[in-house]
Image (cartoon, coloured by chain):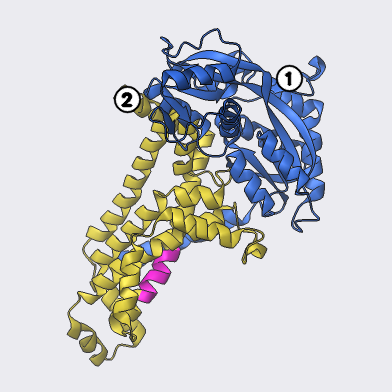
Chain colours: A blue, B yellow
Amino acid sequence: MFQRFSPCMRLVSILAVTFIISSIILGCGGGKEKLILGATTSVQDAGLLDEIVRAFEMHSDYDLIPVVGGSGQILEMARRGEFDVIMTHSPADEEQFIVDGEGLDPRQVMENYFVLVGPKDDPAGVVGVVSLAEALKRIASAEQTFISRGDNSGTHERELSIWQSLLIDPKGQNWYRESATGQGQNLLIANDDAAYTLVDTSTFVTFGSRVQLMPLVTDRVKPNAYTVIRINREKHQHVNVVGAIAFVEFITSAAGQCLIAEFGRSEYGKSLFVPVLGCPQAVGHLGLTSRR
Amino acid sequence: MELIWEGVTEALHLIFSGDAYVYEVTLTSLTVSGSATAIALVIGLGIASLLAFRPPPGRTLALSAFNAGMALPPVAVGLIVAVLLWRTGPLGQLHLLYTPAAIVVAQAVIATPVVTALSTAALQSLPSRLRLQIMALGASRLQATWLLFREARLSLLAAAMAGFGAAISEVGATIMVGGNIKGSTRTLTSAIVLEGQQGDFETAMAFSIILLALIFVVILTFTIVQQRRPQS
């Protein structure tokens, strides 16, 4: 009976069936309550975000939706009431966010370190200096190429705060370039140009074998801290307060902290992020899967 | 160059080892872009037959708009659709943002002008007296339109292929409205972006090859249908 239809008609019916099947598929999974998490690219690029989503959904009854961007973008969208809870790493902006009454209950959950990486021959001679500030100062006076994130991300904010403390304005200098890309992409661009750049240790480990740049100066004084903040419902009526509290409780619990501690061990032989609140050994293994 | 071969090997490995993640992502791409194309076809063919057969006043202006729409920047579409669907936005009540349905909407917006513009051109290139003749033989408007669609099917199927191509290869709007969520809104294109960001270029290359293969298979199917002689 199918033969009676013209080829066009057949194609139309195939499309119609595709559409019906897909609407059924799309229609599913709408049952659970949604919780929207704004997170920074570095957490996604390392692969940790997928793991957090998977673990939290197993642990709770929410449909956790991660939305990814630089810390600047995430905080701005949070100010517009688009998120229930956020996880960022831009301390000064976060403080302002809390002061403005947009966010509540900030908790540091994990950290890594910023590291200045650069070419092996180190033309600016930064190896052995004690601080990032001193290293950037040498790069500026030697006029060696430095690639900046240039995207208001946490890493970018950190870099800018150092330039500011040095009273140097690198913008527009011929040795200073802004990539306006995520953490990993930025590192690859610096690698291509054999330039200096600032990166967090997690991303640097993840990209390890692909990058010839060497870690030169690690800032252990001021870690790169990731903070979770709940969005204030008094400012934004859509906020899912109960869900946000559940997420903060999970990520600060032993289970959440151990998930962070374990992440990356099987693949890279070491943790990519340090859980700030600590993971008691007893809760150690959670049966982490690989990146996917 | 080496990376391309590694990508090919990895792609074959992923396809034949039955990697669940790859199948899930591929299925999402296919259903989402298939639905977007279906919607674009329904709307596009409707508008095209109106513009070609019963030209409303201002047809040239409308047609120019659709022709320009073929170059609609996906990033702009993504931003506009996302802002409309934000929960604080005008359509926030629909709760569509970060769902596959939101991607369908964005891709349909991108594919519809392509289908409309190409279909209108196809229908306009039919001999103008053909429709009069069919009507004179006693066909209803609907029957006449159907017959004319059949007459122009080569070009109409080409329009459908172009629409599908625009939808499935799109990534900017897909990530903006879908969010690239594993297990729900991660498509082949957004998976390529993510793997690239994670520095896993072999897997990114493998996904690219799978995407190219998928597009080829779908377009091949369309082309076989297109090239078949009508059984009348």
Image quadrant where residue A255 sits = top right
Q: Which residue is mark 2?
A: B5
Quadrant of the rendering where the C terminus of chain A is positioned: top right
Q: Residue B42: say if magenta.
A: yes
What element does badge 1 sit on? loop
What element does badge 2 sit on? helix
Residue furthest front as drawn:
A167
Question: Are the residues flagged by discs 1 and 2 from a single subunit?
Answer: no
- Find residue A139 and report its horizontal and vertical position in percent: 47, 19
| Amino acid type at mark 1 | His
Q: Is residue B124 left or right of residue B185?
A: left
Residue furthest top as drawn:
A128
Front residue of this view, candidates A76 and A264: A76
Residue numbers of the magenta segment: B39-47
Who's the residue at 26% across and 67% down the image? B153
Could one spot residue A10 in this view of the protein? Answer: no
Whether residue B193 is situated above or below residue A275 in the rendered picture: below
- Find residue B185 and report its horizontal and vertical position in percent: 55, 47
Front residue of this view, candidates B125 and B57: B57
Q: Which residue is mark 1?
A: A285
